[in-house]
Image (cartoon, rainbow, N blue to C red):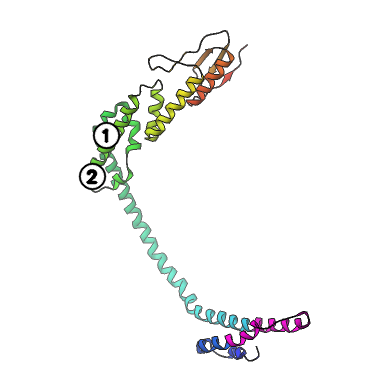
Amino acid sequence: MEKLQLVNLEQTEITSWDFGALKEELSRALSVYKTATYTDDTIKFAKEDKAKLAKTKKILEDQRKAFKAKCMEPYNALEPEIKDLVSMIEEQRVAIDEVVKDYTERKKAEKEKEIRAYYDKKAHVLGDLAAPLYEKILNPKWLNASSRKKYQEEMQTKINEVSHDIQTLMAQESPFEETVIEKYVATLSVEEAKAKQEELMLAASKAGLCQSKENSPVVPETQKEIIIDSEDGILVKMYGSKNQITQMMDFAKAIGVKIVIQQVS
């Protein structure tokens, strides 16, 4: 590595270096090490060569860092001045932004009021479900729509779709129609609503309950009694065998009923 005169670079400006020539010189010098073979007997030379390479690397790195620091001096001097100017601009931008945001929110509120009025006018086909379905049917992009006709057409289409879905579910005459419809209102998914119905039908079947819409599920009466106290204070008594009560409990869980069991003497 002695032939590589990088040591002289410590006394020269990095901007005057001929990097093309340096790279060629470095490649020739390093080729010696690529073909070198070190043994236990020549480990001393391996250590010396390693030290030479490390020294050469340090020269290059030190020069790079020194040049970078020199280049950064004018930048570092200007940076706080520039940031101060930017801060002045940002302060005013934020103030104006608050005005714009206030205007935007007021316009959105006005638009939603307009949209809700149109919805209430058109959603009568949904009956009592119109109110709980509003948030589900509302598309946020309608609040920014510039075309009244466009959002009205899209809303009418959605109302028609939802009305059709509800009619489809009600046509099944499920004994659990109310719960099934509630599931649909929560998800706007016919598939999930039907899955809920199947779940309830299976639970009712396991509990030995009737599955007719005209008849309420009935548990055969026996001597065993269980009291269920719901969260809103309603007291319900159930009569049946231990197995029947267990089946009813499973059914209650299936439809999402929360109950508290109290032991009775």
Identify the amino acid type marked 2: Lys
Does the segment drawn in magenta span residue 39? yes
* Spot occupied by residue 219 in the image (x, y as percentages of width and height): 50, 13
* Spot occupied by residue 165 in the image (x, y as percentages of width and height): 32, 31
What is the C-alpha distance between the residues marked 2 and 1? Answer: 16 Å
Q: Which of marks 2 and 1 is nearer the N terminus?
A: 2
Position of residue 99 relative to residue 28, above or below, is above
Magenta span main SS: helix
Q: Which residue is drawn at 50% across and 78% down?
A: 72
Q: In this view, does 10 lie to the left or right of 197?
A: right
Q: Which of 85 and 186 is in front in this view?
A: 186
- For the N terminus, give its image quadrant: bottom right
Q: Can residue 92 be seen in this view?
A: yes
Count up the numbered dots.
2
Q: Which image quadrant for residue 87?
A: bottom left
Q: In this view, does 205 lie to the left or right of 261?
A: left
Q: How crowded is mark 2: few (under 14 residues within 10 Å), some or many (20 or more)?
A: few
Q: Is residue 17 visible?
A: no
> Which residue is labeled 2 in the image?
150
Q: Nearer the viewer, residue 211 or 112?
A: 211
Q: Which of 232 and 125 is in front in this view?
A: 125
Q: In this view, does 197 lie to the left or right of 229?
A: left
Position of residue 265 relative to residue 97, above or below, is above
> Which residue is labeled 1 in the image?
160
Identify the amino acid type marked 1: Asn
Q: What stretch is highlighted in magenta?
A: 26-55
Position of residue 123 relative to residue 96, above or below, is above
The secondary structure type at the circle numbered 1 is: helix
Q: Which residue is drawn at 47% across and 71% down?
A: 80
Does the segment drawn in magenta span residue 106? no
